């Protein structure tokens, strides 16, 4: 049940979940409590700009159903994450300093740190890889433990458990490549290739190449 004991308080029956508008004299804050702990606060900053603060012991920001569901900040790990979207970072436990924006972005991440995932299912299967940047629908989606990859564009590095230190820019670039230290610039560049240390430049360049340490240029 809900009780309204005063004009500046909305509370449940036992008072531990409530909304307060005047905890202190002329407070001008709206405070939201859940089970006795203040969890959210609406106020104005020093420049009179509205600010919504999510109060979390690990300085995390979670917005969306099941976002950051399993995160457990402990003073070192599980902190400083921004996860926005349905199931974004859902399995995260100890991962820290991650940004996941979009449906199931960083969904399976548990301990991976310093990742940036923007777009639906970006870095979806990542568990403990770190320092990856994935921008675009399903970019670097199937990577599990790889690190230092950059995928910009839909499906870049998206359909393989990729190696480390790859850079792919363009729709489907390095889409199924599981090697490492490859660079692909252009739509479909190196999409179905294999091998390490290759450079692919241009539309569909080296799309099915299987050599290593080679340069492919196409248009």
Image (cartoon, rainbow, N blue to C red):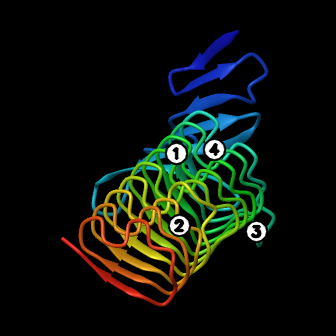
Residue found 32% across the figure and 57% down from its top: 171
Residue indicated by mark 3:
77
Q: Of callouts 3 and 2, which one flags the residue occurring earlier in the amino acid sequence?
A: 3
Residue 70 image offset from top left, x and y in percent? 76, 46
Question: Quick one: 188 or 9, which is closer to the camera?
Answer: 188
Q: CA distance from mark 1 to mark 4?
A: 7 Å
Location of mark 1 (residue)? 41
Residue at x 60%, y 67% (from the top left corner): 162
Outermost residue to the top = 1
Tell me which label, 4 or 3, sits earlier in the chain: 4
Spatial CA span between label 2 and label 1: 46 Å
Instruction: Compute the Cα span from label 3 to label 2.
Output: 32 Å
Q: Position of residue 102 (x, y in %)?
A: 46, 45
Disc 4 element: strand
Question: In the image, is 200 to the left or to the right of 31?
Answer: left
**Place of residue 40 in the rendered image (x, y in percent of width and height, measured from the top left):** 57, 43
């Amino acid at each position: 049940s809900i009780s309204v004991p005063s004009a500046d308080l909305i509370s449940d029956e036992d008072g531990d979940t409530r909304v307060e508008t005047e905890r202190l004299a002329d407070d001008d804050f709206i405070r939201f409590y859940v089970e006795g702990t203040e969890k959210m606060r609406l106020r104005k900053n020093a420049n009179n700009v509205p600010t919504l603060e999510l109060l979390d012991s690990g300085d995390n920001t979670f917005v969306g159903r099941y976002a950051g569901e399993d995160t457990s900040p402990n003073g070192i790990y599980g902190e400083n994450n921004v996860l926005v979207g349905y199931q974004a970072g859902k399995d995260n436990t100890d991962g820290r300093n991650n940004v996941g924006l979009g449906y199931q972005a960083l969904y399976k991440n548990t301990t991976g740190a310093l990742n940036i995932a923007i777009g639906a299912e970006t870095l979806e299967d990542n568990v403990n890889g770190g320092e990856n940047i994935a921008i675009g629908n399903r970019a670097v989606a199937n990577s599990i433990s790889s690190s230092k990859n950059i995928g910009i564009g839909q499906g870049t590095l998206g359909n393989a458990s990729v190696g480390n230190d790859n850079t792919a820019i363009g729709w489907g670039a390095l889409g199924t490549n599981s090697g490492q230290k490859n660079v692909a610039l252009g739509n479909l560049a190196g999409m179905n290739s294999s091998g390490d240390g290759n450079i692919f430049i241009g539309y569909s360049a080296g799309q099915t190449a299987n050599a290593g340490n080679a340069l492919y240029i196409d248009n």
